[in-house]
Amino acid sequence: MTNQAEHTPSNDAEQLELASNTIEWSKVFEVLSDPVFCHDAEFRITLANKAFLTWIGKGREEVLGERYWEVCDFFQGPLKSCTEALDAHGHREERLSYGDGKDFLSRSLPIYDNSGDYLFSVHLLRDLSEQCALEMKLQHEYAVDRAVAELSPLLMVAECSIKEVAEMVLLQAQKLTGAKHGIVSAIDPETGENVGHTLTNMMDQCKVAAEQKKIRFPKGDDGLYPGLFGHALNSRQGFFCNDPDIHPQSIGVPEGHVRLENFLSVPAKVDGRLVGQIALANNDTGFEQWHLDAVDQLGRLYAIAIEYRQKVQQVSVAGQRLRDIIENQADGILVLGSEGNIRFVNRVAETMLGRSNKTLLGRDFGFPVSIGEGKATELQLIQADGELVIAEMRAAETEWDGGGAYVVSLHDITERIQHVQRVEAMLEDTIRAIAMAVEKRDPYTAGHQRRVAELVVALAHELGLGDDSIRGIYLGALIHDVGKIYTPSEVLSRPGKLSAAEFELIKSHTEIGYEIIKDVQFPWPIAKMVLQHHERLDGSGYPRGLSGDEVILETRILSVADVVEAINSHRPYRPALGMDVALREISMHRGSWYDPEVVDACLALLDQGRFHWKEL
């Protein structure tokens, strides 16, 4: 690396530069929606944006000059991320929780001048509470939907015994709740005993007498089922208890019995009549309400399965009951013959397929059916009103009218897909806001990232990339210079040749940009694009001297678009050189610096007049 020339500015110049930088920082911070403040080496606040002041409920004059934990009740002293960032001379972050479900991401970055002297620290706080709650809620809903979707077709297979059904239900209940122990039982319609059909190895671990290791629980003399296991049955309501010893109906356990750390139970009911029970115990973190709601859904499905099998001899009655249940399911249910023709369809499936029962029966389903546990296929269905519905299809083998058939469930995931699309749209808006903040720092290159993004889209189309890849390249191009937000504005806009030290500062924007966005979970390699966009195929680029296949395709496209736009645009140190010079540049270094296929695509687009920037 070139040695930096010694430069010792006067105290007045240092103060002027610091004041200028502070003004620039404040302009950027003020538009951010996240709370941001700056502090000096003594942790005294020197700058705070509106979001931070709103967050702590104080005015600007109340906080400036004060240590941040003295004006904000959330902080008890210097944050770990602050002190570690100062010690490490680099970015640090930590996750903070303040009770009542409030989670924050704390990021601290110390800022130094060109001589390496500390100026101030930037501290950003991001409220993750709503995001975490939404993500957790969606995860829970998806887990329950998946369990229900996997169980629903299997529970309708008449060949499965009650024991096999109970085993499937217990497996899904344990997956959802993390319970170590559990039992799934059914009420004997003749004796009223609660009979365990499947259970975990809880009984094997018991050190009690053999006669006490029973899986039949009769009613007591008072006509009630005893103990915690009996509470859900007696009350006809599910419940959970994370301290079983204090529950009013707890009767303890025999000596040597596995201790119950926590307990959850739901009754399985049909038309208010008890038919069985799901009971779980010893979850590591304690049961929550969503666990109870999830197991309650399994209990309803399990109850349906028990009822179906207990009434198997009354075919007509049981068949009609099952048909009614299916008709009122939230999911679409179909039965297909072995050749794929529709033999049965419920009302929800009629709506999802956009046709009536009469027009569907006997017709070919029209979609391939995949059989197997956990296998799901995504379908796009047009309803009668023209609305698009996205459904997740699962299928299992069964019998219908004495012949082989498939039962198919269609679960509407349109809202979930739309939520993902909304999140991605918000992500794009955030990227555009970042791009705008970068361009505000450098008026001479305003619009550079946007014009590069326009060209990379055209190049990606020319190279035959898919729509999703093109979207990722476009977003990466929009913020490929995000690291320049930390480059002093006087360096960005200085006319004339830069010094070696200034050029090294400019070059650092690739790694700074990478550090800024590397932890954002983009579905595309945007962080690598930001890091690599000045790399060259022959290893002569920066910051890491990558070569050949080490440089990803997205970067190869971005690099060509970046240099063509830069040469064709005005810069503080030179006027625009024009498109001819830009094309000569990429042609001269075709195959050495730049990917030959990307160069050829660029030449074809521009030589043939098939690409024009929206505005220069």
Image: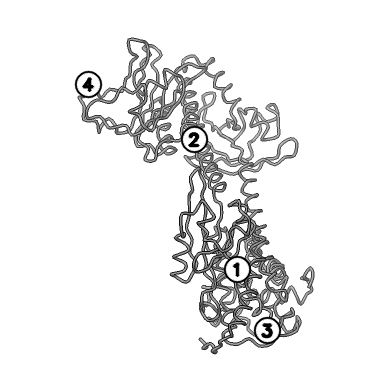
Residue 379 pos. (x, y %): 62, 43
Badge 3 is on which residue? Answer: 585
* Nearer the observer, 141 or 61: 61
**Vertically, is 376 above or below 258?**
below
- Mark 2 or mark 4, which is nearer the start of the sequence? 4
- Cα–Cα span, label 4 and label 2: 36 Å
Residue 613 lies in quadrant: bottom right
- Cα–Cα span, label 1 and label 4: 70 Å
Residue depth check, mark 4 versus mark 2: number of the one nearer the observer: 2
Badge 1 is on which residue? Answer: 554
- Cα–Cα span, label 3 and label 1: 20 Å
- Cα–Cα span, label 2 and label 3: 61 Å
Q: Secondary structure at mark 2?
A: helix
Residue depth check, mark 3 versus mark 4: number of the one nearer the observer: 4
Residue 564 pos. (x, y %): 70, 77
Badge 2 is on which residue? Answer: 290
Mark 2 packing: few (<14 Cα in 10 Å), some, or many (20+)?
A: some
Q: Is residue 470 in view?
A: no
**Vertically, is 208 above or below 520?**
above
Residue depth check, mark 1 versus mark 2: number of the one nearer the observer: 2
The residue under the point 74% across, 79% down is 568
Mark 4 packing: few (<14 Cα in 10 Å), some, or many (20+)?
A: few
Badge 4 is on which residue? Answer: 211
Q: Is residue 232 in view?
A: yes
